[in-house]
Amino acid sequence: MKYALMERFVPEFPIALMARMLEVSRSGFYAWRSRRGPGPRAQARALLDARVSTAFRAAKERSGSPRLVRDLADAGHVHDRKTVANSMKRQGIRAKAARRFKATTNSAHDLPIAPNLLKQDFSAPAPNTRWVGDITYLWTDEGWLYLAVLIDLYSRAVAGWSMSDRMKSNLVCDAMTMAYWRRRPPPGLITHSDRGSQYCSQRYRDLLDRNRMICSMSRKGNCWDNAVAESFFHTLKVELVHGHRFAERETLRQAVFEYIEVDYNRTRRHSALGYVSPERFEAAQAA
């Protein structure tokens, strides 16, 4: 009974003081504690840590505490962000960290340039009214692999994408073709990009004309004019590429396919959407 009483007041009083007051030995108290196993508080903390660790691994080690809070809530376990953050710190786990990226744009050309219609307004009143596109490059042991994407500003969904070992106009045209046939946008959609030669090519401009789309381009040397696309590449590289070695282009192709179509569009929680995935956001808005 004395040891149980001491256990109850451990957070408030020193163990040595309570042992003297109750005329018991500290060693006896520690022996009693080890025999009875962890107390309720320690058990609850261990259970929380296990849940957080499981959710973290299920998110492929890509989620910080804000997203994990919502993943846990969906599983019926409600905790505040500070509690989850403390558990992560206690276990030494953290989401993959950001790094700087290099620009890929080649704007040193004499091809026609479109005006900047977005002017850093990345909102959209409805699906398929405003898309942004960009190109990045990813390294493998076989050489570079280039990725072009088109993102719907309404839901941040990747509407279309394409990969190639050459950064030619067909790269962005293939991404646009995928996006068009998948989403079937109405006439008048604004598609925004940088001033790269691929987006200024005749082939790309003809494709936009046939699909009755309006072309918009960033100002020269201003990456903030296409911040949403830059942010997507930032996320992809941090969560998928950094820290991994890809021996073959085909292996990276498959990894990017899974990341975009399975993880990013369907399940990854987006802070701009109230921490739901693009697919869930569109479904909720359509309901």
Image (tube, grey):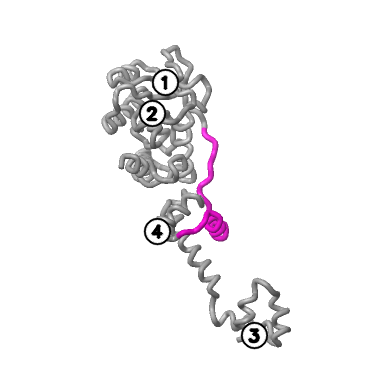
Up-down: is 233 above or below 206?
Answer: below
Task: Find residue 154 and report its image quarter.
Answer: top left
Residue 240 lies, in percent from the top left, at 44, 44
Query: Which numbered disc, 4 or 3, marks the residue closer to the eye?
Result: 4
Q: CA distance from mark 4 to mark 3?
A: 42 Å
Q: In terms of sequence position, does the residue under pointer 2 or pointer 1 come before the other?
A: 2
Q: Which residue is mark 3?
A: 28
Quick check: 182 left or right of 157? left
Q: Is residue 251 visible?
A: no
Q: Which residue is mark 2?
A: 131
Up-down: is 218 above or below 58?
Answer: above
Q: CA distance from mark 4 to mark 1?
A: 43 Å
Report the magenta residues as a range: 78-101
Q: In terms of sequence position, does the residue under pointer 4 or pointer 2 come before the other?
A: 4
Q: Nearer the viewer, residue 51 or 237?
A: 51
Q: Residues within 10 Å of mark 4 (few under 14, many from 20)?
A: few
Q: Which residue is mark 1?
A: 216
Quick check: 26 left or right of 283? right
Q: CA distance from mark 2 to mark 3?
A: 70 Å
Q: Which image quadrant: the N terminus?
A: bottom right
